[in-house]
Image (tube, rainbow, N blue to C red):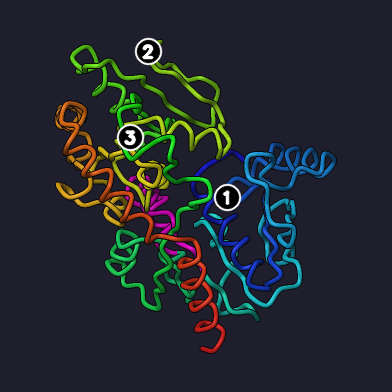
Amino acid sequence: MNPVGGFKVVYRHAEELAWRGYQVAVLHVAEADRLCWRHPIRPVARFLYRSVSRRAGPGGWYPLHANVTCHWRLCPHPRFLPACDIIIASAWQTAEWFHPLTMHQPCFYLVQDYEHYIFAAEKTRVRIAATYKKGWHFLSISPAVTSMLEDLGVENIHDVPNGIDYQRYHVEQSAALNGGNRRGIGFAWRPESHKASMDTVAALDRIRANLHPQPHIWAFGASRRPALPAWVDYHQNPDDASLGQCYRKSALFVVSSHAEGWGLPGAEAMGCGAALVSSDNGGVRAYARHGWNALLSPPGDVAQLARNVSTLWHDSAQRRLFAKRGCLEVRQLTWSRAAEGMERALQSGTKA
């Protein structure tokens, strides 16, 4: 699996539950979408290849706890489930395969699909909304997700906010909190249109000639180097240690997504002492407040995004203040707290 935030959240929750004594199995599937089974050749081939090569987990980019077992399945059909006491769906495509009212185990639904619902085509929106009406116990990762679910008439929502791993994403003495050795501006590259990564490129292109001293502009992503300008230093599939070092060398981190359920990169960068410049994409409000620890702009407003980058780059006092406040804010978002929320939700749901 590619190093994507949604996968990382699932893996980390699995680890936290394993550390608390649960036996956790993570199912990876060759085909999650029911409507694609009219053309089964690709998922079947993918399933056979992964089965032969025994590649069922995240690979080297995320070494899982030994008590978390990974399974490779053709699809998430209930008949392919290992023996379990609790089922947790982690995406709307997998949630389609289950109807909690017909299952013998308590069924939970970790909802991270905020941006996918907001920007989905109408047919897909109908399918996603249908998964919210099946009687799950819902696990919401952010206020934005909770608001979306409530607007759709969903009840039985448990708040389980994401966490930040401070063993990996923290400020080091050698990289003082937004000190003078930070000359980087970073961003995450994703190809999906709602991630709007090219908004960041366009904003930086407008102002980079006027940024003094000249910043080192870098990006990271899961795909091979995309069509980025030569002035962007691109890192493909960095591991956590390498990504943390990039964050710690950065004065600013920029997010331009039009919608986010939460947004791990922005929070990780803040944990490493970078000041955040972001679109007001919904999920970012879980840890960022405009004018207090970040500068936010309307999604799609490239000009304002560029002005905010320029403002914080040239105002070192404000940038350091925002970096300090941001770091303190996201330090409260520990995975231990997230795991406690998950465990409370699971215990509440199994008693219901």
Q: Secondary structure at mark 1?
A: loop
Report whether residue 264 is seen. Answer: yes
Residue at left offset 22%, top offset 44%: 322
Q: CA distance from mark 3 to mark 1?
A: 34 Å
Name the foreground residue: 229 vs 247: 247
Residue underneath mark 1: 33
Q: Are marks 2 and 3 in contact (CB under 8 Å)?
A: no
* Tag 1: amino acid: Asp
Residue that appears at 66% across and 45% down: 58
Q: Horizontal placement of 234 versus 182: left or right?
A: right
The quarter holding residue 100 reads bottom right
Q: Is residue 206 among the parts visible in the rendering?
A: no
x%, y% of residue 32?
A: 60, 51
Quarter of the image with the N terminus is: top right
Disc 3 is placed on an element classified as strand
Q: Amino acid at mark 2?
A: Trp
Q: Which residue is mark 3?
A: 253
Q: Which mark is residue 231?
A: 2
Q: Which residues are magenta?
A: 109-130
